[in-house]
Image (spheres, rainbow, N blue to C red):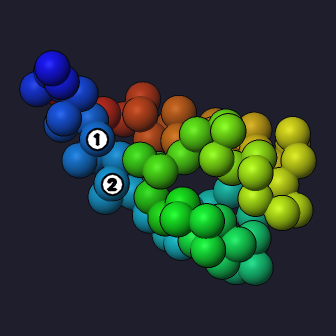
Amino acid sequence: HVTAEARQKQKFLERHFLDAATIPGVGPTKKAALRSFGIETAADVTKTKVIAVKGFGEVLTRAVVDWRKACERRFVF
């Protein structure tokens, strides 16, 4: 079963949209590519999902994953 904390964190991450994020090297075109793969919020970001997107190598993938981690650090249960 999923804990209350995990549920709250998921909801928190779902409110952080990629479109509003400032991620080095990830502009409108890259964000559109991520969206087309169903990656719209911090909750959708995993290394596996992001690296599967055309145009995302190790560096850009790390930048997007780091953005998710930064969002997670702001989460307070």
Horizontal side of residue 66 vs 75, given as left or right: right
**Label 2 to label 1: alpha-carbon separation:** 6 Å
Element assignment for label 1: helix
Along the horizontal axis of the image, is 20 left or right of 57?
A: left
Residue 7 image point, x, y percent: 19, 35
Residue found at the very far left of the displayed protein? 4
69 or 39: which is nearer to us?
39
Q: Which residue is mark 2?
A: 14
Residue in the picture at 54% in, 46% down: 45
Tell me which corner region of the image, top left, top right, bottom left or bottom right, holds residue 63.
Answer: top right
Q: How many marks?
A: 2
Quarter of the image holding residue 67?
top right
Instruction: Describe residue 68's horizontal placement relative to residue 28 as left or right.
Output: left
Amino acid under disc 1: Gln
Which residue is denoted by mark 1 in the rendering? 10
Where is residue 24 shown, x and y percent of the image? 77, 56
Q: Residue 42, relative to residue 65: is it above or below?
A: below
Crowding near pointer 1: few (<14 within 10 Å), some, many (20+)? Answer: some
* On-image quarter of the N terminus: top left
- Judge the density around disc 2: few (<14), some (14-19), many (≥20) Cα neighbours within 10 Å: some
Which residue is at a point 76% across and 51% down the rendered structure image? 52
Kind of residue sitting beneath label 2: Glu
- Residue drawn at x 87%, y 42% is 59
Instruction: Choose top left, top right, bottom left or bottom right for residue 15.
Output: bottom left
The answer to the question of whether label 2 and label 1 lie on touching residues, with beta carbons closer than 8 A, is: yes
